Amino acid sequence: MTIALAPSAGVAAAFAPRPVLRERGQREVFCGLTGIVWLHRKVQDAFFLVVGSRTCAHLLQSAAGVMVFAEPRFATAIIEERDLAGLADANEELDKVVHRLLSRRPEIKLLFLVGSCPSEVIKIDLKRAAERLNGSHGGVRILNYSGSGIETTFTQGEDACLASLVPVMPEEPAHQLLIVGALPDVVEDQFRRLFAELGIARVETLPPRRSKDLPGVGPGTRFLLAQPFLGDTAQALEARGAVHLPALFPFGAEGTTAWLHAAAKEFGIDEMHFRAVVAPGRERAKRAIARQAERLSGKSIFFMPDSQLEVPLARFLHNELGMSLVEVGTPYLHRAHLAAEIAALPADVQLSEGQDVDKQLDRVRAARPDLTVCGLGLANPLESEGLSTKWAIELVFTPVHGFEQAGDLAELFARPLVRRDRLTV
Ligand code: SF4
């Protein structure tokens, strides 16, 4: 079914000519618990306690791997069958588990109770549990969010986690820049250096590396989204008076320049100074991208909906690497946050939102793109049909933002094509 969008006022120009295929059928995506894999590495004194089933525990264990040298900072409180039957007081059990955990692990300063499909089905109220437990464990802050797989996709776990932090951010009236989204430390440091060189003195990040560094928020806060999947977090920040700076997302030379420029403009940075500061990084990014363009230019790519990074990545691959876009599917199309991205796509691109996996696989098979970006479960069947694939989840686990990572980002897409060439020689 193809329908025309009903655009909101501010983004009408970007959307007016673009039809979007909207599908609501069977979907193949991971659930929001997956976000714990990168969030627990980012916030170094946080612990993620999933209240879920053995399936949830298996997902986490296999996605995050086993930590050999450190105690893990995530676990699953398993809801047993007797809990499902209502024979045990799940709240009492949960309180005991939290108490045992926090007594044994004094380094934990922030505990997330993470909801799952089972905890939602039997309606364990984790918000109330967090409120009940808060304050009874010294200085440990206890919050909750849902990572459930019902009607969600895996990057929404980060959105829900960050949104849960916003209400406890202190009030901050100062004019400051807030970078929103969990970036690898090395990438965050690069951005901080660039903002310092530009002359933006006060830069904070959400999430912080340590819970005591949770930034403040208020009407002076201007925020840049580092990821396109943070709709709820952005809304919560706006409710606290913060103002979103619309921009392309910082992928590739073009996206990173535009993203930095949005902040520079807001903070009154002189245009010539801006250009002088970004020029070296931008040139390095362009050179690194050019090395991969030889391999990728003219190749076709099909994005199945998975990470919600699809639209910015499609823009990068088309505009900076010359790839042709067969279909750009995304689980949710955040019309306001993606307005600049969509405006930067070629006019005839097929955008799709949601999924009906069998129909979409038929379109992949009909188009036979050079590369298909999809979830793990779809990659093997497509590879067996002779189609090259890229796992979407790898794009979230790998440092890909900013000038210095632009070449690596391009290479992630070139690698499957190189591999196939080698196999077919
Ligand atoms: S939260 Fe739901 S979808 Fe995710 S692992 Fe647990 S049961 Fe499966």
Image (cartoon, rainbow, N blue to C red):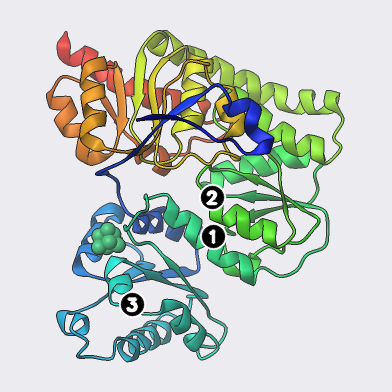
Mark toward the viewer: 3 or 2: 3
Q: Hey, which quadrant is residue 420 in on the image? A: top left
Q: Hey, which quadrant is residue 148 in on the image? A: bottom left
In the shown orientation, is residue 287 left or right of residue 39? Answer: right
Ligand number 1: quarter of image:
bottom left
Q: Quadrant of the N terminus?
A: top left
**In x, y percent, where is residue 367?**
26, 16
Give the residue type that dot 2 points to. Answer: Leu
In the shown orientation, is residue 369 left or right of residue 218? Answer: left
List the residue tagged with mark 2.
230
At horizontal 60% and vertical 45% (from top left) the residue drawn is: 188
Q: Which mark is residue 162?
A: 1
**In x, y percent, where is residue 348?**
47, 15
Give yes or no for contact between labels 2 and 1 (Cβ–Cβ under 8 Å): yes
Q: Identify which residue, 26 or 84, lies in the foreground.
A: 26
**Above or below — where is 322 with respect to 213?**
above
Labels 3 and 2: the sequence-earlier one: 3
CA–CA distance in space, label 3 to label 2: 25 Å
